[in-house]
Image: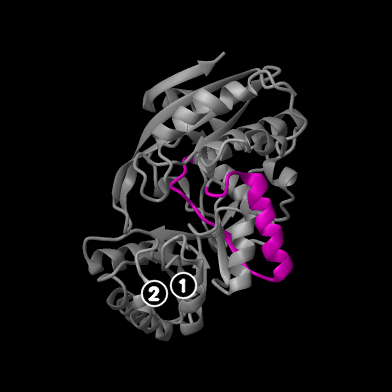
Amino acid sequence: MRLEGFRLHEVEMPLAFPFETSFGREVLRRCLVLSVESGGVQGHGECVAAREPLYSAETTGTAWHVLTEFFLPALLGVEVASPEEVPRRLAGWRGHPMAKAAVEAAVWDLVGRLRGASLSRLLGGTRPQVEVGVSLGLEPTLDALLARIEAYRGQGYRRIKVKVKPGWDLEVVSAIRARFGVDLPLSVDANGAYGLEDAAHLQGLDRHGLAMIEQPLAPDDLVDHAELARRLATPICLDESIRHAQDARQALNLGACRVINIKAARVGGLTEALRIHDLCRARGVPVWCGGMLETGVGRAANLALASLPGFVLPSDLSESRRYYAEDLATPPATLGPGGRMVVPSGPGLGVEVREEVLRARSLRSTRLP
């Protein structure tokens, strides 16, 4: 297929609820939506880079720059045999995995539509539904957090994850356990807010029977994560530390984690995400699919990825209304019985972009050619 044209939008979406982590607080979500065309058919991908370089060095601004100045011009008019060819063609440019992932995702969607096959099927997915959990940000009060957990537990989510940071951790987890008991599947996510000097403090989490503590230390601290893992009974899950399959292999060899959160955007695309999945499955390491406040475009791709057999833990794939009152894609992702979401089975992503919402929320757009 020949990549005949591209369309890029920067959109700003108001969140249904503010989302706060150790990085900061978001009430508006910026992202890029990319479309690629071939033979009159369009595929779509989402770049989840945020407005500020907090979770990663990438931003919507840097992604716009590298996409419009380098990646898209290099691919315009090019014949590609498969989506896996896209990362090979972009490999000469260092970094910018979220921008690369958006291009590859759009081509995966395009291929699925041209072949009449779902993205899940193309990736090797085996499940029509996936178990999902909900990720809760920092709240202004403990009572507000407990009320939020009560609401989402009532909706049927299979796992609750709460954000933690120094000063908002042991007391919070203790209160959750006191309110909901030890049977509530619970994990915490620090987004790298701690150092190895906090090991003794973090050992206080061990008595609460957590499923995992996600990314307790800085992203480049694999060695310190391995040391921390030896001191904790609670399994460590790595997120920001895993940028590609080589990082995953090194982390597992060091004993730096027992669980890995796979985000296709963080690792440069679905092809690299598959490599990490296959590596972890071969070693018996459980994985799950993390979220980045995606619109329905990115969430559909995540659901397809989470349908692979190695994703044995509930993924952070909350339904659309959890984040957006008005989503970019239809049909919206909804939570079904048993805390499961249906994996889209239509061609490609299995969802359609709502062009009227895309236009209304666009801050800028461009086309190539």
Q: Are marks 2 and 1 in contact (CB under 8 Å)?
A: yes
Q: Residue at x 41, y 63 (%)?
A: 218
Q: Amino acid at mark 2?
A: Leu
Few, some or many C-alpha atoms within 10 Å of disc 2 (few <14, some 14-19, many ≥20)?
some
**Residue occupied by mark 2:** 196
For residue 16, which numbered disc appears in the image?
Answer: none
Residue found at the very far top of the displayed protein: 369
Residue 286 drawn in magenta? yes
CA gap, disc 2 and disc 1: 6 Å
| Residue 231 visible somewhere in the drawing | yes
Q: Residue at x 64, y 63 (%)?
A: 249
Q: Residue 144, how many percent across, how many down? A: 25, 63
Q: Which residues are magenta?
A: 266-295
| Secondary-structure class at tag 1 | helix
Residue 220 drawn in magenta? no
For residue 224, which numbered disc appears in the image?
Answer: 1
- The picture quadrant where one finds residue 86 is top right
Q: Residue 154, how many percent across, how many down? A: 42, 64
Precedes in sequence: disc 2 or disc 1: 2
Considering depth in this image, is 225 or 308 the residue closer to the camera? 225
